Image (cartoon, grey):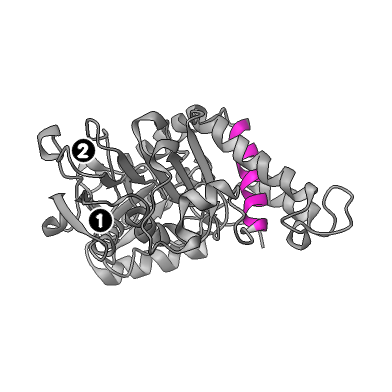
Amino acid sequence: MSRVYNFAPGPAMMPEEALATAAREMLDFGGTGMSVMEMSHRSKGYQAIFDEAGELLRSLMHIPDNYSVLFLQGGATGQFAAVPLNLLKTKADYVDSGNFAHGALTQAEAYGEIHCIASSREDNYTYIPDITPEMVEQDADYVYITTNNTIFGTRYAALPETGAVPLVADMSSNILSEPYDVSRFGVIFAGAQKNIGPAGLTVVIVRKDLLGSPRKDCPKVFNWTLMDEKGSMLNTPPTYAVYMTGLCLKWLQKQGGVEGITQVNIEKARLLYETLDNSAFYRPTARPESRSRMNVTFTTPDPDTDALLVKEAAAQGLVNLKGHRLVGGLRASIYNAMPIEGVQALCAFLKEFERKNA
């Protein structure tokens, strides 16, 4: 069977070039006679793989020298607890813009005083709420946002101004898809399984002056200061996921880096939203000013037709278009590795499906 166009929200489609290289090197990496899966994380050979992946990420994101890059485990959900465990001293401000943002907020409440300064929850997270500088408490330890809402299909078109308060961002579903000035953030973290590499790796980018004072009850594996001191190898890291991440980052480098892939992502999103907006049959669920470029959410006139669309699309090699179980409907995740041809094929299918079922 030929490869499908996989619109899954994560684990997501990966660059074919990276997968082919991994297949070629599976049994014998670089003449070692073993797979990367079998290599000791303490070996000189594996350390080179690990270091190269970190250097590639630094280069692609233009990460300043005063930031540490950590390769951890536990997913973004683990960082919902790690953020307050490392940063919360008195209180923090959170923006509730989606399911994962809400989960982070409720997790942080277990560790201290948390203020929700803006929310779109009552409107089913169809937009990113406005955050003005006056809303940010300047004595807060940090302000927390989720830059892209995977489930509801929204993104921050502009970052909030937080003054001297560190901005913390869960960037899991749009990291590396558009340029960000890392110096505007205190912390960026992301699960890898959407735009970075395979599931199992969690990236944390933290400004070094924010290290050094975790809570006493912070577990070792969540302790950024300790992990930084140990080069992310306090315990065995997700060795193969880091290797695969390096291959994916090399592919991204060949696409012109983040700046190059941004233009492709803008065009993919334009094509798909244009198809939906020019239809009386489909209804995009996110407000136009907050629409995600990575996760496009929409519905047909009824749930039965949604289900039929998912089934017929899969038969044509357009898979994983079912919406999240919390909201239903349909969702096309078009991360970096989704080629423009995949979006073009989806648009053509949507038009034909509408013709037959409207």
| In magenta segment, residue 50 | no
For the question of whether residue 319 can be seen, the reply is no
Which residue was labeled with disc 1?
98
Q: Quadrant of residue 249?
A: top right
Q: Residue at x 63, y 42 (%)?
A: 53
Residue 34 is situated, as x and y percent measured from the top left of the image, at 84, 59
The residue under the point 38% across, 60% down is 216
Closer to the camera, 268 or 191?
Answer: 191
Q: Residues within 10 Å of mark 1 (few under 14, many from 20)?
A: many
At 45% from the left edge and 29% from the top edge, which residue is drawn? 263
Question: In the rendering, at what x and y percent does residue 339 appear?
Answer: 53, 42
| Rendering coords of residue 158 (x, y %) | 26, 33
Front position in the image: 289 or 138: 138
Mark 2 Cα-neighbour bin, 10 Å: few <14, some 14–19, many ≥20: few
- The image's mark for residue 82 is none
Q: Secondary structure at mark 2?
A: helix
Q: Residue 33 in the image: state x and y as whole percent.
A: 89, 57
Give the residues in magenta. 239-253
Q: Is residue 142 above or below residue 122?
A: above
Q: Secondary structure at mark 1?
A: loop
Q: Residue beneath label 2, please? A: 289
Kind of residue sitting beneath label 1: Gly
Compared with 30, 312 (above or below) is: below
